[in-house]
Amino acid sequence: MVNAQCLPAHALTLLPRNLRLAEALRTMPSATTGSADFEQLALPLFASLYNHAFWLTRNQAEGEDLVQETFSKALRAFDTFQPGTNFKAWIFRILRNTFLTSRTGIATSRTVFLEDHPDTLDTIAAGSTPEDTLIRLDNQATLHAALEQLQPQLREALLLCDVEEIKYKDIAVILDVPIGTVMSRISRARRTLRQLLQPHLGESL
């Protein structure tokens, strides 16, 4: 998906501290006869999955464990994947569902935000885009600090849309919420991010 408001992925991507995890996943015992096909689809997404897992868990070790468990579950369930559909959305949903069953995920999911109500839906913010903003930011630490201040549900929707470039309808499936809720979360996340970054950019934001 080409999104004019996308955040530059390179500014938000984190590499796993244990790069051998990817190699370990290659040697994972095959659970299906299509394991080679699974590896061809899944391994290129390793960095994206780890990056998102880190933002979900806020912990490198937990993020690595979450990705490894996700790969294991996805491999076992690969025979249920429908060829021709969006594999990235499929495995990201497994990642999120796996996270929600973890202790950290259970604690996070207990919080309900007002923006999840349909009557609070607003349109995607226009004007200066996050990409325009972040191109002018040299300090990635500033960006990460701002993202950490976002409510988890808002940050997750923003990262799925603007970093992973997943379509709204697929994000709705991953998050198991209506598409209107997805649009509302992304709008609020972008607006809040601008407000958090404004002191670093002055009047140009």
Image (spheres, rainbow, N blue to C red):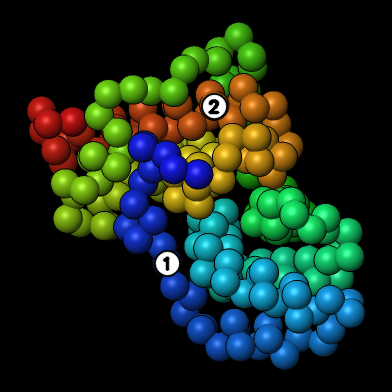
Q: Give how far across and how far down residue 64 sits, in percent.
A: 60, 73
Q: Give how far across and how far down residue 112 sits, in percent.
A: 65, 29
105 sits to left or right of 53: right
Residue drawn at point x = 50 percent, y = 52 percent: 164
Q: CA distance from mark 1 to mark 2?
A: 25 Å
Residue drawn at point x = 83 percent, y = 66 percent: 78
Q: Earlier in the sequence, mark 1 or mark 2?
A: 1
Q: Amino acid at mark 2?
A: Met
Residue drawn at point x = 47 percent, y = 79 percent: 17
For disc 1, the marked residue is 14
Residue, far top: 119
Which quarter of the figure has residue 23?
bottom right
Report helix, strand or loop for mark 2: helix
Q: Vertical placement of 60 versus 142: above or below?
A: below
134 sits to left or right of 44: left
For disc 2, the marked residue is 183
